[in-house]
Image (cartoon, rainbow, N blue to C red):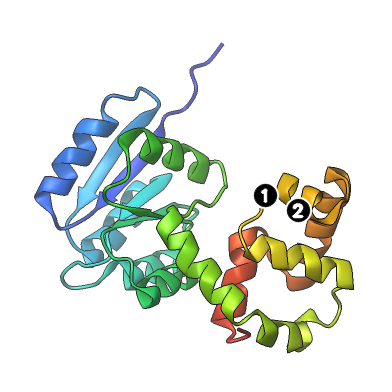
Amino acid sequence: MSEKKAIKVLIVDDSKLTVVGLKTTLKQFDDIEIAGEANDGQMGIEAAKKLNPDVILMDIGMPIMDGIKTTKEIKKAGLSTKIIMLTSHESENDVLDALAAGANSYCMKDVDPDILVAVIKSTYDGASWLDPRIAKIVLDKFVDRFGKFLKNESMSDLTEREVDVLNLIAKGHSNQGISDTLCISLNTVKTHIKNIFQKLEVEDRTQAAMKAVKEDLI
């Protein structure tokens, strides 16, 4: 039986202290391999193209090119690399701009090491993860302007029940929470969510919220 492939991680951060800390943490895990490091955005792009890492841990505030522009350029290059914003920036503009640029997950630098490793693995597997503080920024913005979202033509094909489900998704409810609130089965919830994603042409809950923001629907 062959060994499971280690996840190749590229660290893009101009803080030497942060890089040392991350390398020390990640070296403890056999299923994570540190592919390399870069201390500015331009170097990050070059390293991503050369090393083709599975996951990039990306800071926002860096010289030459910030993490948001770097993320956008890496995504534009067509690389399949997943990008996790790992930063101390939590302003609404930075959060929304980073997600709109293509970041797959968003972590704060004070995240617990075990959680960070779990985020790396889940993001590599195709999931999206937002630090609870960041999720609140995104969901609050979504919920505060949800009425405008409902008026947009992109919502016209949603049924009344799908609108109910989307509203609860925006408020952060799990599938079970939606099931309990609307008194419908989990299978029905999953069907509604699948239909919502198809109609909005998105792949997950975060993308549904971000499409609304990116296209100025909310």
Whether pointer 1 and pointer 2 mark residues with C-beta atoms closer than 8 Å, the reply is yes
Front-most of residues 70 and 136: 136
User: What residue is at 47 percent from the left and 37 percent from the top?
Assistant: 121
Q: Name the spot of residue 17 as percent of width and height, x first.
A: 11, 46
User: What residue is at 38 percent from the left and 66 percent from the top?
Assistant: 71
Amino acid tagged 1: Ser
Q: Name the spot of residue 15 as percent of width and height, x first.
A: 13, 54
Q: Name the spot of residue 4 as percent of width and height, x first.
A: 50, 22
Disc 1 crowd rating (10 Å Cα; few below 14, some 14-19, many 20+) is: few
Dot label at residue 178: 2
- Vertical position of residue 44 compared to residue 155: above or below: above
| Element type at mark 1 | loop
Q: Name the residue under label 1.
A: 174
Instruction: Using the rendered image of the protein, determine whether residue 102 is visible from the camera's viewpoint.
Output: no
Report whether 76 appears left or right of 164: left
- Vertical position of residue 92 compared to residue 48: above or below: below
